Image (cartoon, rainbow, N blue to C red):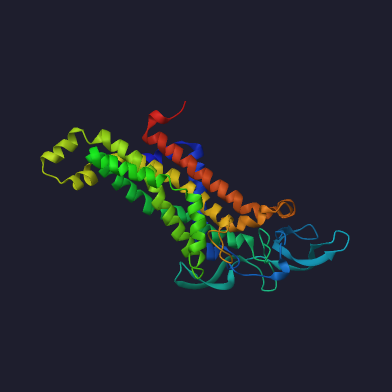
Amino acid sequence: MIKDIFEGILKDKFATIALIVLIFIYFCLFFAEFIAPYSMNYTDRQLSYVPPSPIFTIDENGKLSKPYTYNYKRTYDEELMQTVFKLDRSKKYYLKFFARGEEYSFLWFIPMDRHLITVDNDGRLYLLGGDINGRDVFSRLLFGGRISMTIGFLALFVLFPIGLLYGGISGYFGGKIDMFMMRFAEAVMSIPSFYLLIILAAVLPSNMTSSQRLTLIVVILALIGWAGFARVVRGMVLSIKNQDFVKSAKMAGSSDLRIIIKEVLPQTTSYVIVAMTLSVPGYILSESGLSFLGLGIQQPDASWGNMLKEAQEYINILYRPWLLTPGFLIFVAVLSFNLIGDTIRDILDPKSKTR
């Protein structure tokens, strides 16, 4: 099945592009310490809202040169009554590749200090500009994306096992057991998640780290979200449990739990794969929304959601468009997951494909 899914994705050009984009994003996030010029919390307060560093490959004489940049000089424009940045062309700072920089732990346990791209110590390389605290937006995008792009998989590990087993038991036994279990699932589905999040944000201990806080919230959301998934699984099990292979397993003396896990639930694999693929974008958006509202990852830790919070002011949108980069990455990631999910659905269930 996995081979068929992969081959089907490669036959669809949009799904192929989406898969390449996601692989590239996760590759960059995995090697964030090596790719990022600076650490997540590196700051230079003199470079608050500094524009992106321009990269030059042609020198002042019009000749080809090694890539270099200039530092920005911060000044105050009395006519505009605002801080402006101008390039200080008195000194060039050549880009260095695979050179030494800040120390970090490669793959979380190997001490290293090599970076993909850096400049001299007195130079500054802000490829996507700086934020209000003078931190490199490009570096924080890499570190923040780890949370935004992986938190959905954490929720799936909680949601899908519960939903599968609960829906399988409900549909297999039917009768009063099914009625009671489905009424309980409907009660869980009726819990307003938005107000629950506000309550959680108020009652959670203040000494929790932002990662612990968001993890707990996402797990709780998953504990609420399993109910809808369980209802669909239950409907599929109702049609599967009367088939011959299930009756044969009963006659062979297999226990009910073994039949559910070994015989019935594997028949829902196609739906589960599609549902998992299409659920990840929802949790990416949930994390971004929670962090944007201040209920998730807190500063100075980075996530795409709390980085995007700075762009809510129209002045920043007009004059500092690089702060919108996290929103663009969220859009690209969600769109890519949805394209792949739709393609997998068409592969596993050709009848669902729209003409």
Please indicate whether residue 180 sits to the left or right of residue 332 in the image: left
Residue drawn 59% across the image and 72% down it = 101
- Is 51 located above or below residue 14 in the figure? below
- Is 4 located above or below residue 48 in the figure? above
**Which quadrant holds residue 266?**
top left
In percent of width and height, residue 183 lies at 33, 42
**Which quadrant holds residue 274?**
top left
In percent of width and height, residue 286 lies at 51, 51
In percent of width and height, residue 58 lies at 74, 58
Name the image quarter holding the N terminus. Answer: top left
Of the pair 51 and 302, the residue shown nearer to us: 302
All told, the count of numbered labels is 0
Residue drawn 60% across the image and 50% down it = 327
Q: Does the rendering let one see residue 153?
A: no
- Is 229 located above or below residue 74 in the figure? above
Of the pair 209 and 48, the residue shown nearer to us: 209
Of the pair 213 and 106, the residue shown nearer to us: 213
Residue drawn 41% across the image and 30% down it = 352
Please indicate whether residue 20 sits to the left or right of residue 170 in the image: right
In percent of width and height, residue 140 lies at 59, 62
Q: Does the rendering let one see residue 112?
A: yes
In the picture as drawn, the residue positioned furthest to the top comes out as: 355
Of the pair 182 and 171, the residue shown nearer to us: 182
In the picture as drawn, the residue positioned furthest to the left comes out as: 252
